[in-house]
Amino acid sequence: MFLERHRGAQGVDVVEPFRAEDVPRSDQTAAGCDHEALVRLQAAEPGVDRGMLRAEVRLVDRFGNVQLQARARDMESAGLPNGECVQVAGRFEATHGHTFADVAAGDLVVYEDSAGWVAVAMNSGSAAAALAGEAGSSLTMSPCAP
């Protein structure tokens, strides 16, 4: 990340993240970056079976929403249609919906977030705390038992 000091600031402000290929090679060399040694990390592919989706947690935001390495098409391929009950992590029931308002306070909703990823959230709460989800961990989803 580029770091910049501001007059009067007591710390260092992060200006913006960057990708190595966005920075001129001369700047990378001056910063001691060996461009040839950089490795592009591959994101984990979701596991999609009929009746089950397994996906890695991409990130947990400051509200406790859990973003997964899966897209809406993965939910469809797994047979987890919108509007249906979804079992998350084998022990929590959630509604596959569109917004937090699709569920009551304290209930879980599985939805497509603004970035197009599948996410799990708790209306008026933290899904991450309930699920013990953190970046790099894995979550499974399946249809709720009838």
Image: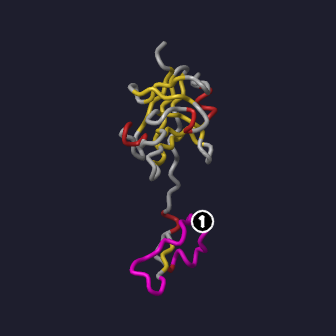
Front residue of 42/48: it is 48
Residue appearing at x 53%, y 40% in the figure: 119
In x, y percent, where is residue 87? Answer: 46, 25
Residue appearing at x 61%, y 74% in the figure: 24
Left or right: 75 in relation to 60: right
In x, y percent, where is residue 98? Answer: 61, 35
Category of crowding for the residue at label 1, using alpha-carbon neighbours closer than 10 angstroms: few (below 14), some (14–19), many (at least 20):
few
User: Residue 96 occupies which quadrant of the picture?
Assistant: top right
Q: Is residue 85 above or below residue 121?
A: above
Kind of residue at badge 1: Glu
Left or right: 53 in relation to 133: right
Start-end of magenta stretch: 6-29
Q: Is residue 31 above or below residue 72?
A: below
Front residue of 10/137: it is 10
- Find the residue positioned furthest to the bottom: 7
SS assignment at label 1? helix
- Find the residue positioned furthest to the top: 146
Residue appearing at x 53%, y 38% in the figure: 45
- Find the residue positioned furthest to the front: 105
| Tag 1 residue | 21
Q: Is residue 29 above or below residue 38?
A: below
Q: How is the image coloured?
A: secondary structure
User: Residue 117 occupies which quadrant of the picture?
Assistant: top right
The mark total stands at: 1
Q: Per the image, is 18 magenta?
A: yes
Q: Is residue 36 above or below residue 64?
A: below
In x, y percent, where is residue 60? Answer: 45, 48
Q: Per the image, is 72 magenta?
A: no
Residue appearing at x 60%, y 65% in the figure: 21
Front residue of 77/37: it is 77
In x, y percent, where is residue 75? Answer: 58, 29
